[in-house]
Image (cartoon, helix red, strand yellow):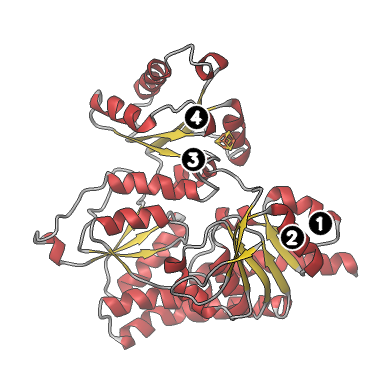
Amino acid sequence: MTVAAPLAPSPRPVLRERGQREVFCGLTGIVWLHRKMPDAFFLVVGSRTCAHLLQSAAGVMIFAEPRFATAIMEEKDLAGLADMNDELDAVVTRLLDRRPGIRTLFLVGSCPSEVIKLDLPRAAQRLQSQRTGIRILSYSGSGIETTFTEGEDACLAALARSAPWTPAGSEAALIPELLVAGALPDIVEDQFERLFADMGLPVRFFPGRSSTDLPAIGPHTRFLLAQPFLGETAAVFEDRGAVRIPAPFPFGAEGTTAWLQAAADLFGVDPLTFRRAIAPGRERAKRALERHRDQLAGKRIFFMPDSQLEVPLARFLATECDAELVEVGTPYLHARHLAPELALLGDDVVISEGQDVDRQLDRVRAARPDLTICGLGLANPLEAEGLSTKWAIELVFTPIHGFEQAGDLAELFSRPLRRRDLIRI
Ligand code: SF4
């Protein structure tokens, strides 16, 4: 373990871990992205392992016409005995002929396609040149390059690169437009849209509900991140002159208020209009949290690195539920995007970046926290040792953003503690 030099702008020291990782790869993001963009199709160019991962991660949903599939690479492909590009073209042609409703096709790279250095961006360009009326993009979801939520980041960055551009100096570039970046469940998107409308603020969401309904991105764009793991997507936006609105993330009553307030302040919404717009939702969120605070107050919580949601969720638990944070691990700490969150965490909270699963498990065992948030593979062994756990993946699959979901978010943490208490009685 090494203690790094302080990260700007937070003066907090961060433990850097560079050991064995135990997290899902970026293919997992397809599970929620294909629901968000029903006119898109995700074609993983991978192995049977990749197909099994997708099937088991999305296994609870059975579609007559699934919107993802795996083009399985056989041994002869991996051995270089077949022309992978010819085979890929044939698979894509069959798919698009059979499914004319597909508007965006994502070719998704995997570990095997990376190992044989299959050039998917070039394949996407080649296939695109043969077709009109469809957008063909590529990104990597491989476990070599991405962990878990980084798959969404890579996908949205590819989509952002293909979005219309508003050139600097054009008339459209002079009218600021609010954009929320990050895949949100439709119900949450509707709630935020209503809140912004009550403040008199039109808003666009990225991605929207159709993969073809892309907002122009340029110097007029003022964007709020809805997810903390969108480093590459934000970089694409900023390269086009878009301006990020710094804010904590919209988890809990206070996080959601601060997130909305950051946009309201930038767009000059008057304080009374802002308070009127948010007051009912904020009150409902606070009341919903009260029910869980007794269970969570004073409880010692340990986050293993997994989804990159750890820092904002830890802030929510500490500042809104009075929980005590033992360690907050995250696979990657984007200091600039997380600066408002880090400023709200106590200086005594240990933050770790990266993974060294054995060392982190040693620290969990030494601290014996009341609750450990971790990946599926680590939960069972810890439970067997009498430690309560929460699967991090549930926090990604459940709607947790915004006022109306604040109580559900707290319950995700309080339920395992309640179960533990019941078992002990
Ligand atoms: Fe496994 Fe890599 Fe395929 Fe992910 S992309 S399922 S880590 S082989």
Q: Is residue 325 above or below residue 361?
A: below
**Neighbour class for label 1 at 10 Å: few (<14), some, many (≥20)?**
few
Give the spatial CA distance, label 3 vs label 2.
27 Å
Q: Report whether 230 appears left or right of 131.
A: right
Extreme-bottom residue of the structure: 272
Q: Earlier in the sequence, mark 3 or mark 4?
A: 4
Q: Amino acid at mark 3?
A: Gly
Q: Residue at x 50, y 17 (%)?
A: 77
Q: Nearer the viewer, mark 1 or mark 3?
A: 3
Front-most of residues 183 and 372 = 372
Front-most of residues 106 and 47 = 47
Q: Are marks 1 and 2 in contact (CB under 8 Å)?
A: yes
Read off the residue under disc 2. Answer: 389
Read off the residue under disc 4. Answer: 69
Give the spatial CA distance, label 3 vs label 4.
14 Å
Q: Is residue 27 above or below residue 51?
A: below
